[in-house]
Amino acid sequence: MEPKELGLTLGSPRLVNILVFEPEDEEHADGTIELITRDYAPKSIQRDEESVKITLEDTLCTIELTKEKDCIVFLIGINHLHDDYVSKNWQEDLEYYRRQVQPVLNTLPQNPILLLSVFVGSTSSLGEALKLVEQYSEYVNCYKPSAGLADGCLLAALRGIATETGAQFLRRELLLSPVNLTFPKAKHSVSELLAGIKHLAINLGKLDRLRRLCQPFFPQIDPAEADMQEKIEGIMNRIRQTEPVEIETLKLWLSEVMVRFSSLSLLSGSIKRDQIAAETYMEENKNLLSQWSETSVEGYPTNMTMETMEYNSVLKPFTDFVGRTEALRTQLETVSDMIRTYLGIGQQEQSSEILKQQVKMLHTIENHESLLKRLTWVVVLLTITLVTLEILGALHVM
């Protein structure tokens, strides 16, 4: 895009890139500071464990590394060497800053989860600041920004910025303009707001990472729900028939229902855990935005309004998924209870039938024993009779 005279002068223009990475990029991140220091060693101004400042021709570049528990954050800022520099063509200066800082960005890990760019420039009035918002929106090809006044600065957020082809990360553009502030006051306000913006960026990156990780599961609820409903209806229809269901079939149904219930519980629990984490990130960001006591400006929705709408949009798939899986779990619990009831009745009937057969068998055995006893007595009597006859016969002979 050809630079052009934009009719605005910006005091102390500055570009800040905040990049959030996965925690597994820590080793690469540690090496990045060393690599930058080695490449720019002759121009290094200040160096410590987690930051380095270097001069790039007539600009000053600051690289800060922050290690969070579950992410790595780089803050790379670039501005003119002289704090009192005034830009008469902010677009030309911004392009220059981007060219100057690109070699530094190229040394970073290649797969951030979020890139948030903040362009800072002081304006002399609110009208000038709003004019800058319009021009910057056109510059980044985004025509629906949100904006509000916080701590004497106009802060505008621009969404829907296209990332490079194939890039899998969230991209945001912010415009921060101190309005008619003295240099010390503007420097303090920008510093405080950037600290908050960095925290916002970290939570936005984590939130978007959760959304991406869970996204493949959300569409699965429709076919899973249809399949389970079909299975549940089949079981219920079979149970309603007058012909009793075999015990082995009931056992098979119960096993299948419990397997589905367990799988659904694990998945629902996992998504519920991520939903709670997402809600935590959202609440932290909303609390931070509230602390800024943002004042609205005519013609723009506030940043709080747009952020809240976006957070609700991100959270909705989590809430819908958990709600629908919980409903399915309740249905499966009801069906499993019903199957257990019928299985219990069937087993009782089976036990009762077995008991009847055992009683019948005992009666048969008792009858056989009674007959055996009678036959035994007959045999005994016959034996006694025969012995008596033999004795009498013997006495007669004598």
Image (cartoon, rainbow, N blue to C red):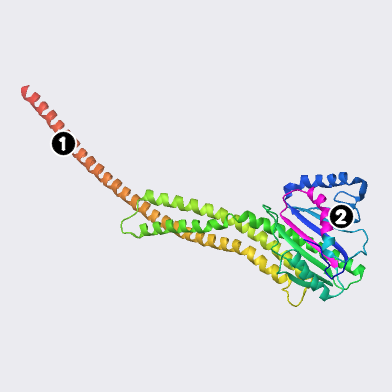
Kindly identify the amino acid type of the residue bearing the numbered disc 2.
Thr
Instruction: For marks 2 and 1, give the one nearer the viewer.
Output: 2
Q: Do the residues labelled 2 and 1 touch (CB within 8 Å)?
A: no
In the image, residue 85 lies at what x, y percent? 92, 64
- In the picture of the structure, the residue carrying the numbered disc 2 is 62
Q: Please name whichever residue, 353 or 119, is drawn nearer the observer in this view of the structure.
A: 119
* Horizontal relation, residue 45 to residue 108: left or right: right
Q: Name which quarter of the figure residue 326 lies in.
A: bottom right
Residue furthest to the bottom in view is: 298
In the image, residue 304 lies at what x, y percent? 72, 70
Viewport quadrant of the N terminus = bottom right
Residue 337 seen in this snapshot: no
Kindly identify the amino acid type of the residue bearing the numbered disc 1.
Val
Task: Tell me, yes or no, whether the highlighted magenta stretch contains residue 113.
Answer: yes
Task: Tell me, yes or no, whether the highlighted magenta stretch contains residue 322.
Answer: no
Viewport quadrant of the C terminus = top left
- In the picture of the structure, the residue carrying the numbered disc 1 is 378
Q: Please name whichever residue, 95 or 177, is drawn nearer the observer in this view of the structure.
A: 95
Mark 2 lies on a secondary structure that is strand
* Horizontal relation, residue 126 to residue 253: left or right: right
What span is colored magenta in the figure? 95-121
Residue furthest to the top in view is: 398
Mark 1 lies on a secondary structure that is helix
Tell me if mark 2 has few (under 14), some (14-19) or many (20+) residues whose alpha carbon lies within 10 angstroms of its own: some
In the image, residue 161 lies at what x, y percent? 71, 61
Earlier residue among tags 2 and 1? 2
Q: Please name whichever residue, 78 or 377, is drawn nearer the observer in this view of the structure.
A: 78
Q: How far apart are the two marked residues, 2 and 1, measured between alpha carbons? A: 119 Å
